[in-house]
Image (spheres, grey):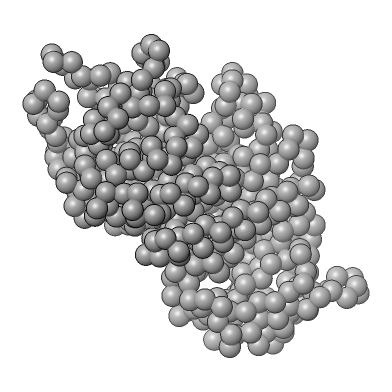
Amino acid sequence: MLTCIMAAFGQEKPKLHIDWNKTLIVSRSTPTLQVVTNPMLNPGAPIHDGSFSALKDLGADYVRYVPWLPYPKIAVAELDPPTKDKTSWDFTYIDPVTKDFLNATSGHSTVINFSTIPAWMFKTDKPVQYPADPNEVFWNYTQGTQLRDPSGKELGDYFARLVSWYTRGGFTDENGKHHESGYHYTFPYWEVLNEVEAEHSTTPEDYTLRYDAIVSAIHKVSPNTKFMGLALAAPRDNPRFFEYFLDHKHHKPGIPLDYISFHFYATPEEGEDLNTWQYSFFDQADGFLSATRYILAIRDRLSSETKIDTDELGVILPNDNAESSDARLTFNRIPQRYWNAAGALYAYLYVELAQLGVDVIGESQLVGYPSQYPSVSMINFKTGKPNARYWVLRMIKDNFHPGDKLVASDSNTADVIAQGFDTPQGRKVMLINKSNSEKTVALNFDFENASSLTIDEQTGDDAPRTGKASGQLTLAPYAVTILTARQ
């Protein structure tokens, strides 16, 4: 047993106990991230090279790839409805980023989610006019609620052709014309649509029908692909989605429910700062964790074989929404320590979700920048270097893996979270300072001369700082440290 005594300037603090003989759970959790397409990931963009280099160096599995609605030409392969004379299939702006992503993640599993349905497939008062410029942001693409083909066949055929473009060397379009790509990638996982309760105001019934249609069609052209469903933006607000979707009787025979996915972003109020973020970030995270427990209970009751992917975890600061609604605004001011606070939040969620047995724990997202959710970025959008959020993920990914034992860690201090991991590489402890003030941890003999890795404000956009523990460990505000006991 390891006993750490929290002490500061003679003031007695609670003791933290880690019982190496009491396993809470054998980890099944994989830490990872998502990559959402935007112009900064286009070839030739200022931070393109640094972003994909960081992604490749990370070497993560289950990386989620999402061509998304704000840039229709980067996200949708058939922007206009087919006629008897021609179709509009065009991968000119989609292929470059997709190939860069697949090359950067080569050798690792990926979760592909072309999340945006062509607008013409929906009933609308008039055709949706998208920008001619592929890099012009357009937030009003997802109009309409009902498909013009309520059977879902047209929808499924679109996604089957898209998957065939990347996995079978090409496809035959609606008029019988063959389109050759020459690509033969493998798509191990496909996630069906994104944040559907918001996009097109989709109901559980409509989503389940669309899921079945898409899965059936993709399975015919990519029979080894597994599928994820839901990708809900606000899981706490939509329990009926889980109740309906996870009930196999609502699906066609043979439709797999391999995974469900859902999201969480801490969203502080306007006017909050580093001193209040230490409360709002983690209080909101605790609310999400409570919702996750209920979701797991629904899963266990209706479809116990279905796995869980929390594939968007992060923070969205108030300025992000204002900038996203008006791309001309560039007033974002993010303090350096924010990146540490957001990194500490991910580390906390990783520990708590791993204790719950969540399979995939995904940080959001590789690249954001002013006008495109800058506070969600894991890359410094000014320099192209990975920031503290990236380095926290990488430090966790390099140290903790499925099969590790999470052991009992008991503390009544709210400021520092510690979790012991019994791993094949030795005993490790991750310590997370949830507060905006310095904390000191006194260590016993087990961790004298332990090696340490630390991400804090001092490391900036650099890799974790290495060191050796001696008597005590001082944690800077929002620091994340991993100690590895001497062998």
Residue 35 percent location from the top left of the image? 43, 43
Q: Is residue 232 left or right of residue 303?
A: right
Of residues 232 and 19, the one drawn nearer to the viewer in this rendering: 232
Please indicate, yes or no, whether residue 176 appears anywhere in the rendered image: yes
Q: Residue furthest front?
A: 249
Question: Residue at left 88%, top 75%?
Answer: 12
Which residue is outermost to the top?
126
> Residue 99: x, y in percent?
29, 40
Q: In the rendered view, does 435 fall on the left or right side of 41? A: right
Which quarter of the image is occupied by the C terminus? bottom right
Residue in front for this viewpoint, 27 or 461:
27
> Residue drawn 62% across and 72% down?
419
Indicate whether 276 appears above or below 433: above
Left or right: 15 in relation to 232? right
Residue situated furthest right in the rendering: 10
Which quadrant holds residue 420?
Answer: bottom right
For residue 351, above or below residue 123: below
Residue under the image location 42 percent in, 60 percent down: 302
Relative to 280, is 169 on the left or the right? left
Query: Residue 437: percent from the left, percent from the top?
Result: 80, 57
In the rendering, at what x and y percent does residue 27 appear? 48, 72
Q: Observer-nearest residue: 21 or 237?
A: 237
Is residue 158 something that shows in the picture?
A: no
- Name the residue located 68 percent from the left edge and 59 percent from the top edge: 479
Q: Quadrant of the N terminus?
A: bottom right
